[in-house]
Amino acid sequence: MRIDLNCDMGESFGAYKLGLDEEVIKYITSANIACGWHAGDPQVMNRTVGLAAAHGVNPGAHPGYPDLLGFGRRNIDCTPAEIRDFVIYQIGALQGFCAANGTRLRHVKPHGNLYLTAVEKESVAAAIAEAIVSVDPELMYVALAGAKGEMVTRIGRQVGLKVVYEAFPDRAYTPEGSLVSRRQEGAVIRDPRVVAERALLMAREGKVKAVDGTIVEIEAQTLCVHGDNPAAVDLVRSIRELMAREGVDVRPMGQPD
């Protein structure tokens, strides 16, 4: 039994520091690195890629809408062609820093509202997939696990991309398998014990308990803990410790057996 543990990272900007990347990196196997549009800047991107390379963590691009003020969590009305070009631009920027640090970009995970819009709108999911495959068809496309990710999987297969399913142990779920809006109380879970137990259930049984108590079936190959969660270090440490005790192998997504 195996699972990847990823975290959104590189979200500082200029003089503003966000997240505890230097501590979180010790416990994860993949890093989703902001590409300067919702967070991050060239210096932060370079530093975060270097940090990942030094710890044997696989770097991935975390492209978002051009929305620094709203941290990429607001919807922006863009055409599919614009989204495609936005994603190509951000992937290319992070690829450059990967080359400069002697490592290779492994995956692409859209950020924030771009991620959630792609789950619901086929044109957006297709634009992202086309952007990824046009840059490097070997890159993996990270999408929401469960029924909501089926459309992305179909689109990914059409263009020849490998889709990796992702679940969120530190986020509350609706009975339909979507993430509860951050505007609602309890949408982000900060208790390390609770998050670790949710992660184990996701990895071992492919299930998550929704806010109404129902069990939602999911199939996840990677689990995400948000780097801007104040408890991120405690969360990833608790997940790794519980996975080790339960015999779950934590390794980077796409790594062969």
Image (cartoon, helix red, strand yellow):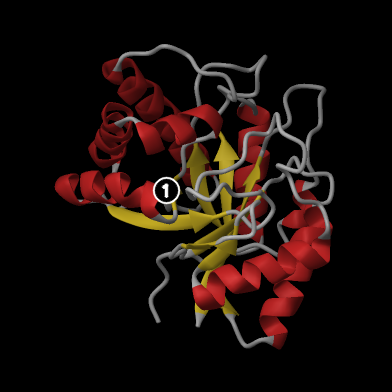
Q: Quadrant of residue 194?
A: bottom right
Q: Is residue 85 left or right of residue 69?
A: left
- Spot occupied by residue 146 in the image (x, y as percentages of width and height): 42, 56
- Spot occupied by residue 252 in the image (x, y as percentages of width and height): 51, 66
Counting every numbered tag in the picture gives 1
Q: Residues within 10 Å of mark 1 (few under 14, many from 20)?
A: many
Residue plotted at (27% across, 18% down): 81
Q: Is residue 155 left or right of residue 35?
A: left
Residue plotted at (70% across, 42% down): 187
Residue plotted at (25% across, 47% down): 156
For mark 1, what is the residue?
143
Residue plotted at (78% across, 34% down): 18
Query: In the rendered image, is residue 66 in sight?
Result: yes
- Spot occupied by residue 95 in the image (x, y as percentages of width and height): 44, 39
Query: In the rendered image, is residue 57 in sight?
Result: no
- In the image, residue 38 above or below residue 21: above
- Spot occupied by residue 75 in the image (x, y as percentages of width and height): 51, 18
Q: Quadrant of the C terminus?
A: bottom left
Identity of the residue furthest to the left in this view: 158
Q: Secondary structure at mark 1?
A: strand
Instruction: Name which residue type carries label 1.
Output: Ala
Q: Quadrant of residue 186?
A: top right
Q: Which is more toward the observer, 91 or 250?
A: 250
